[in-house]
Amino acid sequence: MKIKINNQFFEFRAAPTVQELIQHVFPSGDFAGMALAVNQTVIPKSQWDSLIIHENDQIDIIKATQGG
């Protein structure tokens, strides 16, 4: 199945949860300062383990960085 993440398509064998998707994109496991939206709806981290992503969903991931 194809899922669009930050304007790039990724292939998944099965429908992942938000948590599985994040772990695929950021294998380091550093999720601090991260926000995620599915089809332009922000998903609270408390729902990442249970929310299933569907084919053709649009995922936007934003990671805060420090700088000046």
Image (spheres, rainbow, N blue to C red):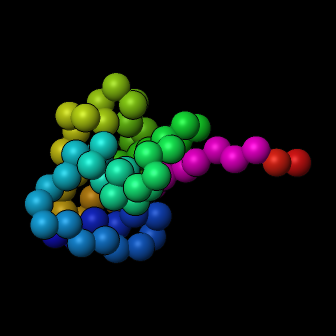
Query: For the point 55% across and 37% down, which residue is it?
Result: 32
Residue at the farthest top position: 46
Residue 63 sits inside the magenta stretch: yes
Q: Which residues are magenta?
A: 59-66
Q: Position of residue 51 (x, y in %)?
A: 22, 39
Q: Is residue 39 something that shows in the picture?
A: no
Q: Position of residue 56 (x, y in %)?
A: 24, 65
Query: For the point 29% across and 30% down, which residue is it?
Result: 47
Where residue 13 sits, quadrant-wise, is: bottom left
Q: Nearer the viewer, residue 37 or 45?
A: 45
For the image, the number of numbered tags is: 0
| Residue 26 vertical placement versus 10 (above, below) | above
Q: Is residue 25 something that shows in the picture?
A: yes
Query: For the point 19% across and 52% down, which residue is it?
Result: 16
Q: Nearer the viewer, residue 58 or 10?
A: 10
Instruction: Indicate the quadrant containing the N terminus: top left, top right, bottom left or bottom right.
Output: bottom left
Where residue 50 sits, quadrant-wise, is: top left
In the picture provided, is 21 more to the left or to the right than 61?
left
